[in-house]
Image: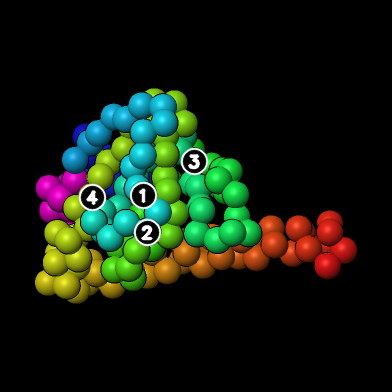
């Protein structure tokens, strides 16, 4: 059941059963296969958010001449992705492709935005948890960058 997966994600874990049921209506479950693209870098087509249920995805960026077309990050089960595009309503910052068979929950970004604007208490919880999640990711990235700089005597 979709609500079970929503409850286990960091951004929805503090919501009650009724709120999760409301959000489940905005979600669809999908299966994708090796190499399929879920999000295309620089795309402005949608602002959907994804929850990875099973499998692994690769996050790839080509946005700069300094970056190759290699995997930047790999993610495994129960990770959220696509949230930056949803939050900023800007172009996608990277391409997300499947590494093998992948099962996801796709959350309609426009419908979610409308829901949290009307249901401000839920909106506060979701935005707070999303900020915590992004802060954690930023701290991990910062530590990785420090290690890279240290290893390269920079």
Q: As rendered, which of 36 and 3 lies closer to the eye?
A: 36
Q: As displayed, is residue 55 above or below residue 138?
A: above
Within 10 Å of disc 1 (Cα), the crowding (few <14, some 14-19, many 20+) is some
> Where is residue 114 drawn, in percent x and y?
14, 67
The label shown at residue 42 is: 2
Q: Assess whether residue 25 is covered by the magenta stretch.
A: yes
The magenta segment:
19-27
As measured in the structure, the alpha-carbon distance from the residue carrying label 1 to the one carrying label 3 is 12 Å
* In the image, residue 95 above or below residue 148: above
Quarter of the figure with residue 46: bottom left
* Residue ID for mark 4: 107
Q: Is residue 39 magenta?
A: no
Q: Secondary structure at mark 3?
A: strand
The scheme the figure's colours follow is: rainbow
The kind of secondary structure element at disc 1 is loop
Q: Main secondary structure of the magenta part?
A: helix
């Amino acid at each position: 059941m979709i609500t079970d997966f929503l409850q286990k994600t960091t951004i929805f874990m503090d919501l009650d059963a009724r709120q999760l049921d409301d959000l489940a209506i905005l979600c669809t479950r999908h299966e994708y296969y090796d190499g399929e693209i879920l999000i295309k870098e620089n795309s402005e087509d949608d602002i959907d958010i994804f929850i990875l249920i099973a499998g692994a995805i690769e996050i790839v960026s080509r946005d700069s001449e300094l970056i190759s077309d290699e995997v930047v990050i790999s993610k495994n089960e129960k990770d959220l992705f696509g949230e930056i595009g949803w939050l900023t309503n800007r172009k996608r910052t990277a391409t997300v492709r499947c590494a093998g068979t992948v099962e996801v929950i796709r959350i309609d970004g426009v419908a979610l935005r409308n829901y949290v604007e009307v249901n401000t208490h839920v909106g506060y919880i979701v935005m707070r948890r999303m900020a915590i999640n992004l802060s954690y990711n930023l701290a991990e990235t910062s530590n990785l960058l420090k290690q890279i700089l240290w290893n390269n005597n920079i």
